[in-house]
Image: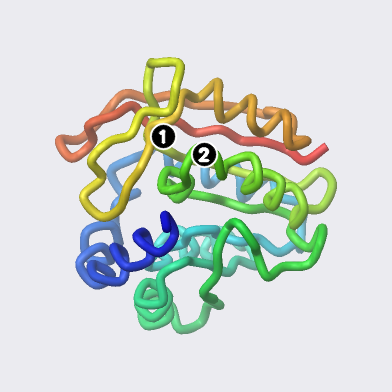
């Protein structure tokens, strides 16, 4: 049910969402610097997947940073938008709960504010799927709305049901799935449209 609602929500706003977020990283230097660091640390020549890529703006950034990047998203309308905006890149419809990717085929994966729509009970399986598709030593970069509390906190996302996550809980889930934490950033809202701390964590597959 969660994926059905999320898919329908993003299908309905794909064009508007693309317009709103196409240049969103321009005014977020800390966030952008983490993506740049991720790109520099990914093993050379390896494939990278942007999981929950939306209209493909982060996938496009990864491409400009020299990575063999492609995008996967639950929403067909978002995939159509991503292909229209970035015709030179690969985008496919798919779910983070069952990625159509080979075991150990990725050098890196990024989930930029896409985990938030997963029901908390789903996240261990999603992390297991991330672990499956990454090669040993592969990197996983996550960004998400965070909370200073100890538990996942549902909030009004407007498009689809979503949760703020304590950064320690995300780190714990990664550790349980076979990842080692490399770095983290928890920053406070920088713009009027941000109403939550922003959590970022970089993990490496053991």
Q: Secondary structure at mark 2?
A: helix
In this orientation, which residue lies closer to the viewer: 86 or 123?
123
**Outermost residue, front side:** 1
Q: Badge 2, how many Cα within 10 Å: few under 14, some, many 20+?
A: some
Residue 31, image x, y percentages: 42, 39
Which labelled disc corresponds to residue 34? 2
In-image side of 31 versus 93 (left or right): left
In this orientation, which residue lies closer to the viewer: 164 or 65?
164
Quadrant for residue 77, please give it.
Answer: bottom left
In-image side of 205 versus 65 (left or right): right
**Outermost residue, top side:** 149
* Cα–Cα span, label 1 and label 2: 7 Å
Quadrant for residue 150, please give it.
Answer: top left
Please, is residue 121 above or below residue 62 in the view? above
Residue 64, image x, y percentages: 51, 64
- Assign the C terminus to one quadrant of the image: top right
Which residue is at 54% across, 39% downward?
A: 121
- Assign the N terminus to one quadrant of the image: bottom left
Which labelled disc corresponds to residue 30? 1
Which residue is at 51% across, 39% downward?
A: 34
Colour scheme of this structure image?
rainbow
Q: Badge 1, how many Cα within 10 Å: few under 14, some, many 20+?
A: few
Which residue is at 38% across, 37% downward?
A: 163
The reply to whether callout 1 and callout 2 are in contact (CB within 8 Å) is yes
Which labelled disc corresponds to residue 153? none
Please, is residue 122 above or below residue 200 in the view? below
Residue 148, image x, y percentages: 38, 16
Residue 136, image x, y percentages: 84, 47
In this orientation, which residue lies closer to the viewer: 3 or 16?
3
Q: Secondary structure at mark 1?
A: helix
Please, is residue 107 above or below residue 206 in the view? below
């Amino acid at each position: 049910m969660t994926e059905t609602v999320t898919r329908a929500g993003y299908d309905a706003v794909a064009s508007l969402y693309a317009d709103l977020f196409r240049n969103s990283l321009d005014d977020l230097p800390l966030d952008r610097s983490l993506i740049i660091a991720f790109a520099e640390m990914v093993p050379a020549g390896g494939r990278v997947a942007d999981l929950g890529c939306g209209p493909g703006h982060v996938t496009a950034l990864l491409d400009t940073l020299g990575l063999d990047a492609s995008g996967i998203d639950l929403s067909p309308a978002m995939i159509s938008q991503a292909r229209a905006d970035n015709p030179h890149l690969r985008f496919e419809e798919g779910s983070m709960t069952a990625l159509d990717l080979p075991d150990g085929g990725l050098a890196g994966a990024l989930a930029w504010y896409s985990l938030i729509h997963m029901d908390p009970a789903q996240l261990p399986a999603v992390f297991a799927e991330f672990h499956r598709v990454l090669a040993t030593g592969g990197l996983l970069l996550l960004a998400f709305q965070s909370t200073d509390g100890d538990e996942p906190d549902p909030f009004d996302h407007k498009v689809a049901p979503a949760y703020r996550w304590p950064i320690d809980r995300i780190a714990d889930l990664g550790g349980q799935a076979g990842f080692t934490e490399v770095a983290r950033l928890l920053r406070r809202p920088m713009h009027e449209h941000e109403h939550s701390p922003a959590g970022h964590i970089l993990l490496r597959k053991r």
